Amino acid sequence: MKEQKATPDLNAQIAELTNDLQRTRADFENFRKQTDAQREQAKTLAANATVIKLLPLLDDLALAIAAHPELKPLEKTFKKTLSELNLEQINSAPGTDFNPDLHEAVTMEDGEGEREVIIETLRPGYLYQGQVLRATMVKVGHEK
């Protein structure tokens, strides 16, 4: 049997089909990556929505623990559970520097000094996986 030599037309057709195949593979890979990213985003949004719905319960539990000393043993479990959920309460202890990225100033007390500090926490705020889920509502004052 004789071998046939590829003609220039056949070579061009092979090159075109090879390019089409490479583009199709690249398109599919891009589609797969985009789908994976969308799936992860949906998971994150669902987790955020679930945790946001838990915040009023967490607020009530924190108030109950503060109001009833006999519930103090629950505080350790409460903080451990928050940690396991990657949910962290934002530091808003009196004297802490006010940070508008983390704190929402509800009132501003007049005073001397240039440094803005937290005077009182009105509602705790939370970080979820390092991102602000809800800012802490605080009263702010001035300190030297």
Image (cartoon, helix red, strand yellow):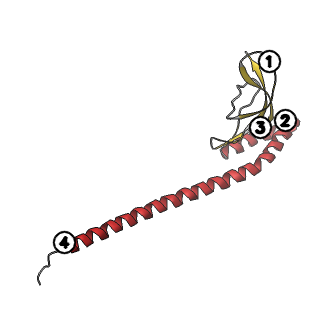
Quadrant in which residue 13 is drawn? bottom left
Badge 3 or badge 4: first in the primary sequence = 4
Q: Mark 1 = which residue?
A: 111
- For image coordinates 57% across by 55% down, the residue present is 40
- Mark 1: amino acid: Gly
3D distance between C-alphas at marks 1 and 2: 29 Å
Taking the image as shown, residue 48 lies to the left or right of residue 68, namely left
Which structural element holds mark 3? loop
Badge 4 or badge 2: first in the primary sequence = 4
Badge 1 or badge 2: first in the primary sequence = 2
Q: Mark 4 = which residue?
A: 8
Local crowd size for mark 1, using a 10 Å CA cut-off: few (<14), some (14–19), many (≥20): few
- Mark 4: amino acid: Pro
Contact flag, marks 3 and 1 (Cβ < 8 Å) = no
Name the residue nearer the viewer: 1 or 80. 1
Q: Mark 2 = which residue?
A: 66
Quadrant in which residue 109 is drawn? top right
Local crowd size for mark 2, using a 10 Å CA cut-off: few (<14), some (14–19), many (≥20): few
3D distance between C-alphas at marks 3 and 2: 13 Å
Where residue 128 appears, as percent x and y from the top left, is 66, 44
Local crowd size for mark 4, using a 10 Å CA cut-off: few (<14), some (14–19), many (≥20): few
3D distance between C-alphas at marks 4 and 2: 85 Å
3D distance between C-alphas at marks 3 and 4: 74 Å
Q: Mark 3 = which residue?
A: 124
Which structural element holds mark 4? helix
Which structural element holds mark 1? loop
Q: Nearer the viewer, mark 4 or mark 1?
A: 4
Badge 4 or badge 1: first in the primary sequence = 4
Q: Nearer the viewer, mark 1 or mark 2?
A: 1
- Mark 3: amino acid: Pro
Q: Nearer the viewer, mark 3 or mark 2?
A: 3
